[in-house]
Amino acid sequence: MPAIETPMPTSPTANAGPALSPGPGDPLHPGVLPMGRIPVVGVLPSVDGGTRPAKSVVDEVFWVEARVFREGHDAVNATAVLTDPDGVDHFYPMTCVNVGLSIWHCQVAANCTGWWSYRVEGWSDPWSTWVHDGTIKIEAGIDSELMLEEGAQVIEAALAALPAAATEDERDELADAVTALRDVSRPPVARLRAATAPEVQDVFDTHPFREKVSPSPAYLLHVERERALYGAWYEIFPRSEGATRDLTTGKWTSGTFRTATKRLPAIAAMGFDVVYLTPIHPIGTTARKGRNNSLAALPGDPGSPYAIGSPDGGHDALHPELGTFEDFDAFVAEAHRLGMEVALDIALQCSPDHPYVASHPEWFTTRADGTIAYAENPPKKYQDIYPLNFDNDPAGAYAEVRRMIQVWIDHGVRAFRVDNPHTKPVEFWQWLIADVAREHPDVIWLSEAFTKPAMMHTLAKAGFQQSYTYYAWRNQKWELEAYCRELAGDAAAYMRPSFWPTTHDILTPFMQYGGPTAWKLRAALAALLVPTYGIYTGYELMESVARPGVEEQIDNEKYEFKDRRWADYEPGGPKEGQSLAGYLTMLNAARAAHPSLRWLRNLHFHAVPDENIMCFSKSRVLPDGRRDTVIVVANLDPHSTRETEITLDMPALGLDWNDSFQVHDLVTGATWDWTQHAYARLGADTEPVHILELVGS
């Protein structure tokens, strides 16, 4: 992806689109975009027709594509241009990949955060036109002297147009080519060969001679930090970390930020990047839910942390049993010291005891009988939760949420997992995320919207950096491949998926009945198919018993404390070896060691005849020129052992079709010699997944 011209300052709006050619007047209807001298159409990526920004992170490679063509038979060419936040243009040569369809593309990458733009410039290529026509005619002895002189004039014009950055050697190459073309003492074909020598072509490749340059409109590109695309999240209920129960009285003592802080080294040791906290605010008592979502809470039941608000405060306050802001700050500081960020759950809903209910009743929906409407997702009812209504007083409600978010930013939070954002106006999220980004562009928002595709995608377009997905319910090979192709394809320009095998609300039948093999398999696929994935605490322990009739765990942690007795699973403990902590550590170590696993758009599937075995790869050329490649083979059936042949798409791995190579399995430590056709055996009696690094890549 080399830049082909020296970057030059330019106005960000200078290339908003081609101007109409001079004439007796402008006949176009206002708003109709005029065609350029060299038409450029169908520029990709294009989010909602270019009305919304595309997204990338620093140094993330993505494709820019367009259809570029012209009248007649003269040569046409194309250049992709990225304009950085300082207004400097960076040029990338494009390649025509389908002459008949006039499709040009190239790979580009932005090297810093901020608001960029990209465009495609079509241009007339007089040098290529002459090389094509001149070679045909001169080799055929037709108009040789005329063609040679026309070539000399083209090169002279190119020489005059060379940028200041061109070297003296490059200028000499063109000057010598002109001399050779006019050297009548040499045969015409020899003069042609001298003027079209590789050294001369190299100069034109580096400094193209572009005429009739016609830019497409400029499209916005929002470039963010790497964590917006890549990260491993670990979810905890802070009140459970360090919670204890008196075996005599049965009374629970809540965990605190101080006791939860003691859990952080173990989370960091597994290689997680983000520790995500479910709501940490005061919990209401009115209509408090009991264990397993019971409508009758018993004494000592802590209630759902999503029923936010009590006389102790609301969304900007801490539950008194968790500790003080000093304790919270210490938790955040320790997470940062261990190399992790803290993400906070934002649930814009209130318990009936929230201060807002008394101070701002207009922020809720009032029913015909005068009562405030509680949350419902039929047949589910949430009598302990009042959803906020943003339509009655949008200015006041918007401002209050923005103020509340700032409280947590000021306490070191740089990531927010938003609960059910699809139940709030999309325009509100667009405003909030943009307003926060004005002063805090590093803040990341994760959308927890298990909803219709249109809403899920639109929330991403509105600004959410990351999105929960349907991954938990995609189990078959065909549906996983189709879904991941969608996510890594056009949708990757604006939507970054986060894969979660389970959450505190989701325990699918696949996980209930798949056994340890399923838990390994689904964690590995989540961690390797996409750059961001998440684990709900207790995943290591394979907590797989569901509450009858629903796809969630029995004794759900939303409604009670959990003492998982982590020490029992440590070396020497009574349950040593019964945890997947080591497996998760291996997955995160693979992700950390292989930069190819930190990208989404480089996902590539390979052919496997077995309908239950999937093979995919990720490959990435590193700044030092080395290629990092990982191949993953997974048996999606947790109940059987299967074997099959794999046919690899070798160019996708950076290899030739007949190459042989070594792969090293990060799961088992084995090393094998592979070719285009490879063999795999995976299942419950071995391992469900191979994670293969190419040796020497």
Image: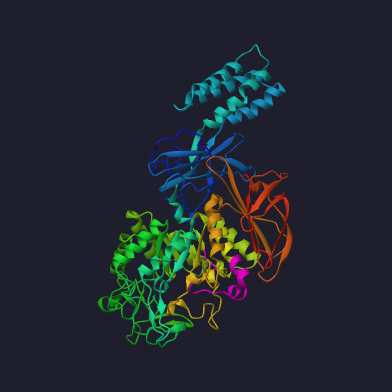
Q: Is residue 507 magenta?
A: yes
- The residue nearer to you, when weighing 651 against 318, is 318
The stretch of residues the image draws in magenta is: 499-521
Regarding residue 458, the answer to whether it shows in the image is no
User: For the point 48% across and 65% down, which residue is it?
Assistant: 456
Coloring applied to the structure: rainbow
Asked if residue 697 is positioned above or below residue 187 in the image, the reply reads: below
User: Where's residue 487, x and y in %?
Assistant: 55, 59
Asked if residue 385 is positioned above or below residue 579 in the image, the reply reads: below
User: Where's residue 442, x and y in %?
Assistant: 38, 54
Which quarter of the figure has residue 412?
bottom left
Which quarter of the figure has residue 438?
bottom left
Asked if residue 674 is positioned above or below residue 418 in the image, the reply reads: above
- The residue nearer to you, when weighing 293 against 58, is 293
User: Where's residue 324, x and y in %?
Assistant: 29, 69
Asked if residue 237 is positioned above or below residue 176 in the image, the reply reads: below
- The residue nearer to you, when weighing 590 against 8, is 590
Regarding residue 519, the answer to whether it shows in the image is yes
- In the picture as drawn, the residue positioned furthest to the front comes out as 572
Q: Quadrant of the N terminus?
A: top right
- The residue nearer to you, when weighing 469 against 180, is 469
